[in-house]
Amino acid sequence: MSSEWRTVEIASLCEGIFDGPHATPKKTAQGPIFLGISSLERGRLNLTNTEHLSEDDFSKWTKRVVPREGDIVFSYETRLGEVAIIPADLRCCLGRRMALMRIDRTKALPEYVLYAYMAPAFQAVIKTRTVHGSTVDRIPLTEFGSFPISVPSLRTQREITEILGALDDRITLLRETNKTLEAIAQTIFKSWFVDYEPVRSKMEGRQPEGMDEETAALFSDSLEESELGLVPNGWHWGSLDDLSTLNPESWTAKKHPEILKYVDLSNTKENIISGASMLSFEAAPSRARRVLRKGDSIVGTVRPGNKSYAFITSDFENLTGSTGFAVLRPKNLELAEFIYISATRESVIEHLTHIADGGAYPAIRPEAVAKVRVVIPSDKALEKFHQIVSPLFESIANNQSRMEVLTSMRDTLLPRLISGQIRLPEAQERAENALS
């Protein structure tokens, strides 16, 4: 390790370490954001499922500290090791089991502390200092300030964060691009198969907006009554198991690969699979059994509201999912995108969350996903939908592959940079090659 590196107590880098109130305020539809530990996601704040609180409660919940740009927030109970940085213009308060470090910028850069926190060395410190309780694991916050962390000069910190930040910025851009691409597909799905906009346009004597005549001809010009409301003439209600096969393949003790790539609920979130593990079959958990193929949709059956779902775009031979997923394999690949969007629409996830039972461990049976009701359009409409949206999902797949490469590079460089085990020019060159 370079001589400029030193090990210090983390409190020595901070202006203060704070925690939030040990309670939960009444949630509101709008207002300041109430951060929860579920928002912490591999160094980022995921505000997809944001909760809010009133202005009156905000003043109460921020008596100890008002989070501001550059503050480091982390979990000190459950989800230990998770951390994120507060971005600019985020008006928020700390939730339960969450603490905050305010970094003294004369001693350390917040971005550096974030990366150092995520590095294996500090994660190991967290593990050794964890108190294992009867209900939850926790970090004693009164002792946290004494946790050791490695720190170089401010100049070296800046160079490290520039290298890792460039990789993270590209990963974030690709992730946001994928969200946009999927939103386009969802918009088309809703227009065609939920709101029936092409049909309603034709009923009013108008050409469906943004649609050529050939595509418009695939839609009727009338709606008819059905047991679940109006549907376009010739379409009918069914369920996802009319279009797919539930959990079609599983590895067994007698038939399995030596090595598998394992996808669990914990690393699957809103069509992003991060950190799938390469494991021997013997070392893999007993729930690593579902065989996954390109075109499958997977939906988490434990706490469905966590949105542990994804569309499988990889043709990796031994890709394997947890038995905590319901796997929907399309009866033909032209149905794949229709099935995925049907199974993961917000209203469907809300329905699955509502019917989940089990108290502290709410879950549904995989059959509940397969029995989700959908309007089944004509074969030609389904084929046209596939032709339009499959290029979007191919782009998503390419971006996901790119993200995996960049994430692997970041995770490789992170511990070596934080420990001073790699020269900065070499790390810079490797990052630039990965970004090019």
Image (spheres, rainbow, N blue to C red):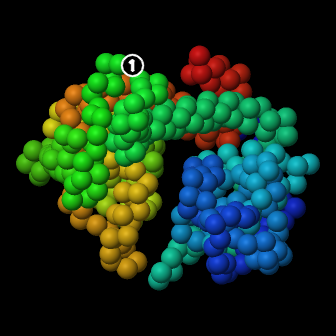
Q: Residue visible at 68% across and 30% down?
A: 166
Q: Is residue 223 visible?
A: yes
Relative vertical location of residue 84 with respect to residue 133 in this rendering, above or below: above
Relative vertical location of residue 176 with respect to residue 265 in this rendering, above or below: above
Query: Where in the figure is residue 255, as x and y percent of width and height?
Result: 10, 44
Q: Residue visible at 82% across and 57% down?
A: 68
Q: Residue visible at 34% across and 25% down?
A: 216
Q: Residue furthest front?
A: 205
For the C terminus, the quadrant is top right
Q: Quadrant of residue 213?
A: top left
Q: Nearer the viewer, residue 254 or 376?
A: 376
Q: Quadrant of residue 416?
A: top right
Q: Residue visible at 7% across and 48% down?
A: 254
Q: Residue furthest right?
A: 106
Q: Is residue 142 left or right of residue 154?
A: left
Q: Nearer the viewer, residue 156 or 299?
A: 299
Q: Nearer the viewer, residue 149 or 207?
A: 207
Q: Is residue 392 visible?
A: no
User: In what element is the residue under mark 1?
Assistant: loop
For the N terminus, the quadrant is top right
Q: Residues within 10 Å of mark 1 (few under 14, many from 20)?
A: few
Counting the numbered discs, the total is: 1
Q: Nearer the viewer, residue 383 or 31?
A: 383
Q: Is residue 229 left or right of residue 258?
A: right
Q: Is residue 426 left or right of residue 249?
A: right
Query: Where in the figure is residue 268, as x and y percent of width and height?
Result: 42, 49
Query: Where in the figure is residue 325, as x and y percent of width and height?
Result: 29, 55
Relative vertical location of residue 346 with respect to residue 295 in this rendering, above or below: below
The kind of residue tagged 1 is Asp
Q: Quadrant of residue 38?
A: bottom right
Query: Where in the figure is residue 383, as x and y percent of width and height?
Result: 25, 28
- The residue that label 1 is drawn on is 212
